[in-house]
Image (cartoon, helix red, strand yellow):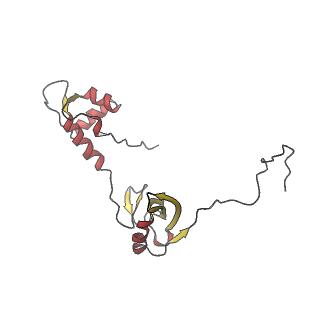
Amino acid sequence: MVKKKRKHNPNRIKKHRSYTFAEIAEVFEIHIRTVQTWRKQGMNVLDETSRPYLVSGEDIRSFLRVKNSKNKHRLKSGEFFCVKCRQPRKPLPDKVRIILTGKKLGSRYKQVIFKGLCSICGRNLTVFSSDRKWLNLSKTIMNLAECKIQLNGTNRHCINTDIKGGLNEKT
């Protein structure tokens, strides 16, 4: 099982105040060892010789902003983020589909879902976007297939859905 990385909101810290490691751990509801690890990763303390260590709020906020921004990947036009590769990837050109949901995004645009396969690992890729960006993607990737939202199934009903309450008969 892979642990999900948490993003800690730097705005929970007051920048003109100093905090001990225990207070930082309490604010973010984390273990004090995590804060000690942050110090090893580069979070500055005010005075190395005094105990308990004090950290200025501004240093905590800047450290967390840098730490959170390392995980962000800016996607270029025609790219998807592959969860398995953990990198922006181009999809296989013949496997890209567009699903028009019909949901409105504001007053002008409608939601579009792009689905494709990663060109490296073959994993499913999904990007939620607007119909405005559809044109940009269609210029970079050819052979886009438009899909309508539909339910998959058969005309036969489940045996257990007898409304009258009588015995179920197989057809």
23 with respect to 167 (left or right): left
Q: Quadrant of the C terminus?
A: bottom right
Q: Is residue 87 above or below residue 160?
A: below
Res 148 seen here: yes
Residue 106 x %, y %? 43, 57
47 with respect to 63 (left or right): left
Total marks placed:
0
Residue 110 x %, y %? 47, 62
Q: Quadrant of residue 59?
A: top left
Residue 153 x %, y %? 69, 59
Res 41 seen here: no
Residue at screen point 25% across, 29% down: 21
Residue 84 x %, y %? 43, 55
| Residue ranking furthest to the top | 51
Residue at screen point 32% across, 59% down: 74
Q: Quadrant of residue 57?
A: top left
Q: Is residue 19 above or below residue 111?
A: above
| Residue ranking furthest to the front | 107
Residue at screen point 50% across, 69% down: 95
